[in-house]
Amino acid sequence: MPRLAGQDMLSHLLKINPGARVIFASGFMDPETKSAIAVTGTREFIQKPYSAVEVLSRVREVLNK
């Protein structure tokens, strides 16, 4: 995102809706960042590149939880 880092966007989103089901997508995510994001309630991570089938599968998994 051009003006807001993913973690910052997640923080804003969770202020609006603390129960939001979040899937985080990234080209690269170091273990420290992934751990910091996981404690916020992110349900899944998708590593780029990913296919439409993989995205749909992850969305279905999160919605079914």
Image: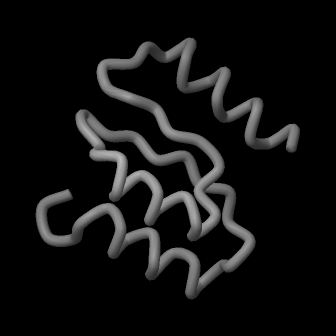
- Count of marks, rendered view: 0
As drawn, 21 above or below 11: above
Residue 20 x/y as whole percent: 67, 66
- Tell me residue 22's x, y (percent): 59, 55
**31 with respect to 53 (left or right):** left
Quarter where residue 4 is shown: bottom left
Residue at the extreme bottom? 15
Residue drawn at x 75%, y 30% is: 60
Residue drawn at (31%, 40%), measured in percent from left and top?
Answer: 26
Residue at image coords 40%, 40%: 25
The answer to whether residue 16 is left or right of residue 63 is left
Left or right: residue 27 versus residue 12 is: left
Please, which colouring scheme is shown? one colour
Decide: is 19 above or below 25. Answer: below
- Which quarter of the picture shows residue 61? top right
Across and down, in percent, residue 65 comes to 86, 44
Q: Residue at x 67, y 21 (%)?
A: 57
Tell me where residue 42 appears, x and y as whole percent: 59, 56
